């Protein structure tokens, strides 16, 4: 396993991921599963996030609590990253949000950027770029290129299913970026789809095919 990859293999994750992969899972359940899986990933992703102590009052008296300390930005890659972003924001509602629009040209498989709106002043932010699928890695590398122009403190890439070409591409272009994934599938087919994967994440999320 590449050293920049963290594989999250909790049994609950494996169970939900299996249902996500199934051809007969409809869009409603697919969206719910993506949100749930993204929420579960938050536990691992934010394991080392900075916290600070704060004085609080419980109904019984004074206490010292701990809260997240720092600037967190979640940046979904449109379209498929939107629902993952929602799942993460349910757990970390104080995170700031950006959006990057990229689609993969179906013939050349090259990423095509069509939108980019990042939160302002992210120099002190830990940025989490989210997209369910890491296949050739073209979209991820392009998104990381764009985010790096804003010079954030750190960048992590969070996906549900990845494949070796995408992992290697990120490692080659952005060795400082860690990848969180629930599965590393063996290969891509001739159309650049992950095998066995789950098919087209955007189409399954939004029922567009
Ligand atoms: C999918 C997926 C990733 C990209 C991964 O998006 O959500 O963004 O493909 O492939 P890559 O690693 O080979 O670049 P898609 O291009 O289908 O766009 P969509 O989300 O708008 O459907
Ligand atoms: N994009 C998808 O939605 N699925 C894949 O398997 C590869 C790229």
Image (cartoon, helix red, strand yellow):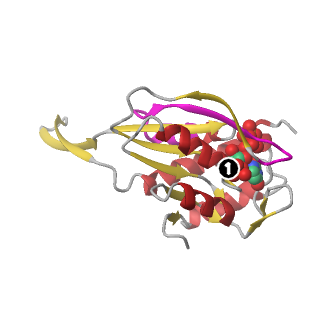
Relative vertical location of residue 45 with respect to residue 102 in this rendering, above or below: below
Q: Quadrant of residue 72?
A: top left
Kindly identify the residue that appears in the image at 86 percent across and 60 percent down: 190
Q: Secondary structure at mark 1?
A: helix
Q: Quadrant of the C terminus?
A: top right
Kindly identify the residue that appears in the image at 59 percent across and 29 percent down: 116
Q: How many marks?
A: 1
Q: Quadrant of residue 103?
A: top right
Taking the image as shown, residue 129 lies to the left or right of residue 108, namely left
Residue 28 in view: no
Q: Give coordinates of residue 34: x percent, y percent.
A: 64, 47
Q: Quadrant of the N terminus?
A: bottom right
Q: Give coordinates of residue 194: x percent, y percent.
A: 76, 60
Residue 203 in view: yes
Q: Give coordinates of residue 208: x percent, y percent.
A: 84, 36
Residue 46 drawn in magenta: no
The answer to whether the beta carbon of the residue marked 1 is less than 8 Å from any atom of ligand 1 is yes
Taking the image as shown, residue 190 lies to the left or right of residue 122, namely right
Q: Give coordinates of residue 148: x percent, y percent.
A: 47, 41
- The residue at which mark 1 appears reads as 138
Taking the image as shown, residue 42 lies to the left or right of residue 159, namely left
Q: Residues within 10 Å of mark 1 (few under 14, many from 20)?
A: many
Kindly identify the residue that appears in the image at 67 percent across and 59 percent down: 17
Q: Nearer the viewer, residue 32 or 113?
A: 113
Taking the image as shown, residue 30 lies to the left or right of residue 49, namely right
The part of the chain drawn in magenta is 85-109
Q: Quadrant of residue 67?
A: top left
Extreme-bottom residue of the structure:
1
């Amino acid at each position: 396993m590449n050293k920049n990859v963290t594989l999250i293999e909790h049994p609950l994750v494996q169970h939900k991921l299996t249902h996500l992969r199934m051809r007969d899972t409809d869009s409603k359940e697919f969206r719910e599963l993506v949100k749930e899986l993204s929420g579960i990933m938050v536990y691992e992703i934010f394991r080392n996030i900075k916290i600070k102590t704060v004085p609080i009052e419980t109904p019984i008296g004074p206490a010292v609590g701990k809260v997240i300390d720092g600037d967190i930005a979640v940046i979904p890659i449109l379209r498929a990253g939107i629902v993952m972003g929602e799942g993460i924001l349910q757990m970390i509602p104080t995170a700031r949000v950006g959006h990057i629009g990229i689609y993969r040209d179906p013939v050349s498989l090259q990423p095509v950027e069509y939108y980019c709106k990042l939160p302002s002043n992210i120099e002190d932010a830990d940025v989490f770029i989210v997209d369910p699928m890491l296949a050739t890695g073209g979209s991820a590398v392009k998104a990381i290129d764009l985010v790096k122009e804003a010079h954030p403190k750190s960048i992590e890439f969070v996906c549900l299913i990845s494949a070796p070409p995408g992992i290697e591409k990120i490692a080659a272009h952005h060795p400082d970026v860690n990848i969180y994934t629930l599965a590393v599938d063996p290969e891509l087919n001739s159309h650049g789809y992950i095998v066995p994967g789950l098919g087209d994440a955007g189409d399954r999320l939004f029922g567009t095919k």
